[in-house]
Image (cartoon, rainbow, N blue to C red):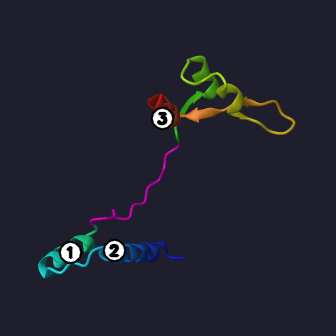
Amino acid sequence: MDVFQLRDRLITDYADYVRSFVPIQDVRLREAVDRELAAGLLWPEPRLGLNPAFESGASIDDLVASGVLHPGCADIFRIKRDGEPSRPLNLYRHQVEAIEAAR
């Protein structure tokens, strides 16, 4: 599978889908819309990124102890493996920030 060909096909299909909503009778307006769609108005340029290692954050137990999470979370959100005692679940910094923002 060529991901770039897949992207091009998706964009073409989506542009056809968008154009199907309302047939534009005015030639100048239709040309302007077609130019904008061809220029990528509705989709970004392809992007390749590399994710760095995520920064460690607090554990669920830490967030419970600080009052950010309900005490029951310390019992529910744990790493549990057969035959081993459960242990705290550690989060990444962005996850802790999201929980704090949601709170």
State the residue at coordinates (87%, 36%): 83
* Closest to the observer, 39 or 47: 39
Where is mark 2, residue-wise?
15
Q: Quadrant of residue 45?
A: bottom left
The reply to whether the magenta stretch includes residue 32 is no
Q: Quadrant of residue 75?
A: top right
The crowd level at tag 1 (other Cα within 10 Å; few <14, some 14-19, many 20+) is few
Three-letter code for the amino acid on which mark 1 is drawn: Arg
The Cα atoms of the two marked residues, 2 and 1, are separated by 11 Å
The Cα atoms of the two marked residues, 3 and 1, are separated by 39 Å
What are the residue bounds of the magenta stretch? 41-53
Which secondary structure dominates the residues rendered in magenta?
loop
Q: Position of residue 11 (x, y in %)?
A: 38, 73
For the N terminus, the image quarter is bottom right
- Note whether 10 is above or below 48 in the view shown: below
Outermost residue, right direction? 83
Where is mark 1, residue-wise?
35
Determine whether, in the image, residue 50 is placed left or right of residue 77. Answer: left
Q: Are marks 3 and 2 in contact (CB under 8 Å)?
A: no
Where is mark 3, residue-wise?
98
